Amino acid sequence: MEMDFEQVFRDMLAAARDRLDARGPQARNYLREVMEQQKDVLARLARDRVSGALSDEDLRMELEAVRADVTVALEGLEVIARETAESAWNAAVKVLLEALTAAI
Amino acid sequence: MWPGPAGAVMPRTDRMRAVHGCVCTLLLLAFLGGCAAADFAPGYDPQTATQVAATYKAVTRFYMRLRETAEGERAYAGFAPGYDEVAVEMKTLAWSARRQAHNRASRDMARRLQADWREIEARHRKRDSYADALADIDEQRLDNLLDDMASVESHKRKLPDGD
């Protein structure tokens, strides 16, 4: 049986795009989650510095810690991106294998 | 001799060759499927997920004990064992995250938690006190990191169809 590879490739792209569309919002949601968390911490830091509950040194140390925390928290985006890419690739390969199975 | 589909007779050796060809094709497809399937994302690790919860619990317990003590009576010595308890949970979490491939994010988050905890303990030891305002912020920062780790772990879960 003949195999129309151009059509198969279009189907592969469509399958990959479906997965990307389905998983795309996950990265955005994670980023929003991280930003919301830090908003709470920063608001508390500002309030406590103004009230005098925190010293300048406390504020400096906490801000440095927040910067380090956010840096590693954002690495979580890489996991989501890898998951998404893996899912898209596997969906495309599945289409190719189904086409091959039908053709052989 | 074996009867063919339309009553024709297929020699036994031809039929065996056909079956053999089919099996080889299926094996080849299975092999190609296995080779072509990507595996560049870390897999879900229930042990890490469980250890995130255990660490969260230890941190919560530590700060509950801290708040039960009046702000002016929080000398470091009274809390040293509590620091050790949390440090053990964090070290176990870091070990768990290290075991997996492609797991840089969780590994770095676990290391950051440990570094955070060491800094908090060093400050407490140096000042021999721990103010409520700092405790609230520190606990929230640790909770945030643990929340992020839990969230990342949940993203690693593969859906049943391999999605």
Image: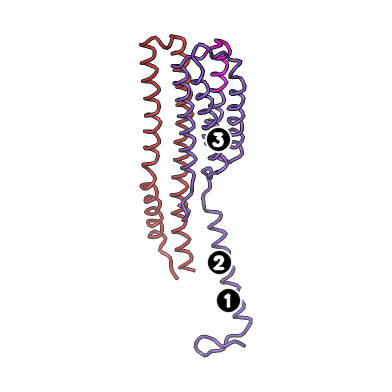
Chain colours: A red, B purple
Going from N to C along the chain, the mark reached first, 3 or 1, is 1
Residue B100 lies in what quarter of the image?
A: top right
Q: Quadrant of residue B51?
A: top right
Local secondary structure at mark 3: helix
Query: B73 left or right of A53?
Result: right
Q: Looking at the figure, which quarter contains the N terminus of chain B?
A: bottom right
Q: Residues within 10 Å of mark 3 (few under 14, many from 20)?
A: some
Q: Classify A59 as above or below A14.
A: above
| Callout 3–callout 2 Cβ contact below 8 Å | no
Q: Is residue B34 above or below residue B15?
A: above
The residue to which callout 1 is attached is B18
Q: Which mark is residue B141?
A: none
Please name which of the two marks, 1 or 2, marks the residue nearer to the observer. 2
Task: Name the amino acid type tagged 1.
Answer: Ala
The Cα–Cα distance between marks 3 and 1, rounded to whole angstroms, is: 58 Å
Q: Camera-side residue: B161 or B83? A: B83
Which residue is under mark 2? B26
Mark before the other along the chain sequence, 1 or 2: 1
- Pinpoint the chain carrying mark 3: B
As helix, strand or loop, the secondary structure at mark 1 comes to: helix
Where does the magenta region start and end?
B117-129
Q: In the rendered image, is residue B123 in sight? A: no
Q: Residue at x 41, y 11 (%)?
A: A53
Q: Amino acid at mark 3?
A: Ala
Q: Which mark is residue B54?
A: 3
Q: How many marks?
A: 3
Between the residue at mark 1 and the residue at mark 2, the CA separation in whole angstroms equals 12 Å
Q: Is residue B122 magenta?
A: yes
Q: Residue at x 57, y 18 (%)?
A: B121
Query: To which quarter of the image does residue B74 belong?
Result: top right
